[in-house]
Image (cartoon, grey):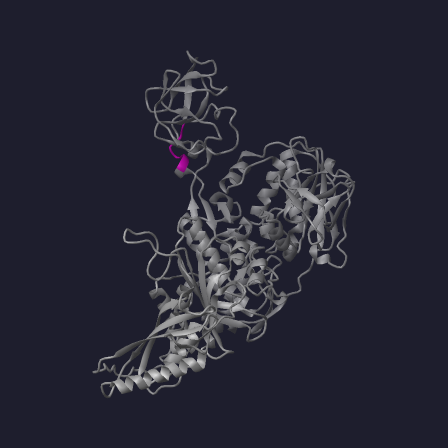
Amino acid sequence: MKFTLSWLKDHLETDASLEEILERLTMIGLEVEEVTNPADRLGTFRIARVLEAEQHPNADRLRVLKVDTGDGEPVQVVCGAPNARAGLRGVFAKPGDYVPGLDVTLSVGKIRDVESFGMMASERELELSDEHDGIIDLPEDAPVGVRYVEYAGLDDPVIEIGLTPNRPDCAGVYGIARDLAASGLGALKNPQKTHLNASADANVSVRIELGNNIEDCPAFGYRVVRGVKNGPSPKWLQKRLIAIGLRPINALVDITNYLTFDQGRPLHVFDADKVSGDLVVRYGKKGEELIGLDGKTYQVDETDVVIADDNGVESLGGIMGGEVSGCDENTTNVIIEAALWNPLTIARTGRKLGISTDARYRFERGVDPAYTMEGLDLATKLAIDFCGGQPSEAKLTGEIPQSHRVIDFPYSEVKRLAGLDLSHAEIKAVLTMLGFWVTGNSDVVKVAPPTWRPDVHGKSDLVEEVMRMVGVDKVPSTTLPRMEPVSQKVLTTSQVRRAHARRALAARGMDEAVTWSFIPAAHAEIFGGGQAELKLANPISSDMSDMRPSLLPGLLAAAQRNADRGFPDVALFEVGQVFFGDGEQDQKVMVAGIRRGTASFDGAGRHWSGNSDAVHVFDAKADAEAALTAIGVAPDKLMVFTDAPSYYHPGRSGALKMGPKNTLAYFGEIHPQTLEDLDIEGPLVAFEMFVDAAPQPKKKPTKSKGAFVAPDLMPVRRDYAFVVDKDVPVEKLMRAARGADKALIVDVNLFDIYEGQGVPEGQRSLAIDVMLQPTKKTLTDEDIEAVSAKIVKAVEKATGGVLRG
């Protein structure tokens, strides 16, 4: 929300300085985000007088001017403006000045062989308006040498506040002034009542045809003004609109923009001669479209509330008017509209069509219903003042909703909730200044919020209002009582596991990402989601419509964004919630990670000593095992299965389980079809880990680790090559070998896979390295042979494999 200091003082009588106003705004919850001053960028431009204007010797459309800038000797300026003449007083820019409308810094130049030591500026070159047919032409009494911003009153600070969604009353300058006055920083100027003498016939009627959903447009106020002469709005109004970033268009349009920001009351003006028949507030029809005032075409449907006539849709109610019935310089008869709209309908239509306007911003937060007809009267008065014309009687279709909110408010709540020790009279005075109706003389009074405060519903809201006005800095600081030392752990097992998993994955060179919990419906369906109960009733955008069933869609999209910006080799992980339904146990904590390109654990990219290979399934498996190890799962207890979800590549993916039913993690390459559906380029591998699926840790009497024991005896290694069927998993063979003698066998490693001559077709040779670690005595040949026999027997029983001859 932007406004100028002078604009604020139109409604607030105060002697406070700019710094005091800014500090008070922040203190009452209207946080100041930025303060700018046009004088900062236009302060170097000065008023100058043209002494002579002669024809350029080498150009028909140029003149050579002698300009008095008030600094002594006249300067020579080459100018092409048609109104450049002797005696003209305008705005001069010297070499070194920055011209915002041209985005250039002036220097001494030569134009058609004639030197120019500056320029005479137009309004567009100073970004004051779109006028550029000639240079600025000031009155004869304009003082030469004076800064133009001071003469024109442009040294008016522009204040921008960060307005929270619950404060629609401060979406207008008058509401901000009301809050400041209630805080004691000046007095609120009460607006004068508008009196209009109706002298024209309306000859237009409005119907609301919304069936039983009258809340979508409960009231529609309007008035016809005939015989207007539309043209530019007054300079003071144009300057205010320009200061807050709006472009002046014409008087009728500028009035609606001005009242939107001045009173927080959006309105719309139709060209009455372009309206055919009566205006009807109804729902759109499939296939209808509207060419908006922004020149874009919008398709409407049965969920959109529109204003239509016999020609079709003329306006999107509360959001944007149509180009066809818009006002221009030929407009002579107008219909001024001041209606009420349902905030939810406005928000839904605006998001669906991607339209963001100042009117939508206010209507979807809630405007003051009681100001509907007053706003219509004020807009009519300004239209008559600026454009002339004869108004009709104001008409109202529908009924303005009445507020019946009354809150039983104990004064003691201020002390209990805010810690402020205030008298009853002080509390009542604050609420009354803010527009609240307060009645009662006991310790509990009845309070009715004003119509412009739809956010106040209960006692705590009233306490907040009192605290805002008195000052948050007045809330006493109280030291919390010292509690007994915390003797038990504070973090839950799940929280501890998440921290350990983060540390382990970061140590493996992965960067943590935080992605949205909402994803597009198409992406949710790919990863097993898309159920009706997981769709958002009021999504932020159409691309954030469903709760995510997996962390991978967000990570994959993040990897692609990095690749699009020149960083193809990324390794990302995330710890967060996923959603499988709306039941109590359907929200799970997961850890997921991806690697793209050559971002393996050993490093990524090109190097003189050898380029990195592309990531593969075993990179993802190693990441999953590292994360599981970090949360306390022993790797040797994991079993590998091949039943990974369909978005993984079959044959290049797997599941890590403890038993056939307890799945702890998935890993593998992402399926090519999944990448195509997501419009993502590979290669990509990923893993997902269910944090809470791992067994709960056993209670230990101490957190200290056991003493490290270094074996005194040398380990023994033996190699074995087994011939097994091709479909026998390697993990199954290695697990069988490891379990043959758990006391002596400490490690089993696969070092060769062979298929070909000497091995029967349909089978393969798997060579493993087994390490035996004796602890009590050196192993004899007989001991080693005994262990070898156990290994061969265990592998044969588990896989059907035999030693290769």
Q: Quadrant of residue 745?
A: bottom left
Q: Which residue is nearer to you in this view: 577 or 705?
A: 705
Left or right: 653 as drawn, with respect to 390: left
* x and y percentages locating residue 470 in the rendered image: 46, 62
Left or right: 765 as drawn, with respect to 333: left
Decide if residue 28 is in sight here. no
Q: In the displayed structure, would residue 272 be above or below residue 727?
A: above
Q: Residue at x 21, y 82 (%)?
A: 713
- Please identify the quadrant where the C terminus is shown: bottom left
Residue 279 drawn in magenta: no
* x and y percentages locating residue 392 in the rendered image: 74, 41
Q: Which residues are magenta?
A: 41-46
Residue 42 drawn in magenta: yes
Q: Quadrant of residue 107?
A: top left
Q: Which residue appears farthest toward the left when viewing the image?
A: 712
Left or right: 33 as drawn, with respect to 264: left
Q: Which residue is nearer to you in this view: 344 or 226?
A: 344
Q: In the displayed structure, would residue 248 be above or below residue 434?
A: above
Decide if residue 81 is in sight here. yes
* x and y percentages locating residue 594 in the rendered image: 43, 61
